[in-house]
Image (spheres, rainbow, N blue to C red):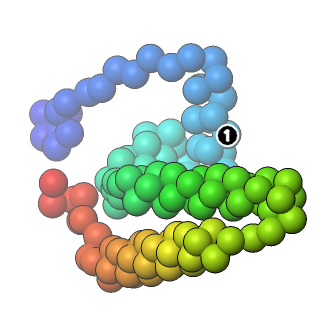
Amino acid sequence: MANRVRTHGIYLMLSDDELKVLEKKYRLSGCKTLRQFIMKCIIGKDIFVLDMTAFRELSASIGRITGSINQIAKRVNSTAAIYKDDIIDIQELLKKQGKDIYSMRKRLYDLGNLETINTEEI
């Protein structure tokens, strides 16, 4: 053992539920040992960090559009008339929504074309 390459150990505490998940994934992995499975999870996987800001903004924008449409629908139901300004408001909101969706799709496409981080070099 004097020529051991891996000289650092890690101790990990898990709850009962976390241990069950680990054991289930280990069994499904087909790895011969738990150590092999853990090493495969740590070293053999690329790490992706997702910035959910764009999705939250899009969700908020959809909420605003929905609220505006509901207000207009209530007004139409109570007055039996729809106003040109209401239609223009909806059109502007939908145009902005379309631009936001296009922007998000472009960002996702650009992210998909990036090279992933090689964790073995880290």
Q: Position of residue 61 (x, y in %)?
A: 51, 58
Q: Which amino acid does label 1 sit on?
A: Lys
Q: Is residue 119 left or right of residue 76?
A: left
Q: With respect to residue 117, does 113 lie above or below? A: below
Name the image quarter holding the C terminus: bottom left
The residue under the point 56% across, 54% down is 64
Q: Is residue 115 left or right of residue 31?
A: left
The residue under the point 17% across, 33% down is 7
Name the image quarter holding the N terminus: top left
Q: With respect to residue 108, does 75 lie above or below? A: above
The residue under the point 46% across, 73% down is 96
Q: Dot 1 corresponds to which residue?
A: 24
Q: Is residue 20 visible?
A: yes
Q: With respect to residue 20, does 75 lie above or below? A: below
Label 1: how many Cα within 10 Å (few below 14, some 14–19, many 20+): few
Q: Where is residue 90 in the image (x, y as percent from the top left)?
A: 60, 71
Using the image as rendered, state which of residue 96 and residue 34 is in the foreground: 96
Using the image as rendered, state which of residue 3 and residue 32 is in the foreground: 32
Q: Where is residue 108 in the image (x, y as percent from the top left)?
A: 40, 74
Using the image as rendered, state which of residue 1 and residue 106 is in the foreground: 106
The residue under the point 43% across, 78% down is 99
Disc 1, SS: helix
Using the image as rendered, state which of residue 120 and residue 95 is in the foreground: 95
Q: Where is residue 39 in the image (x, y as percent from the top left)?
A: 38, 47
Tally the marks.
1
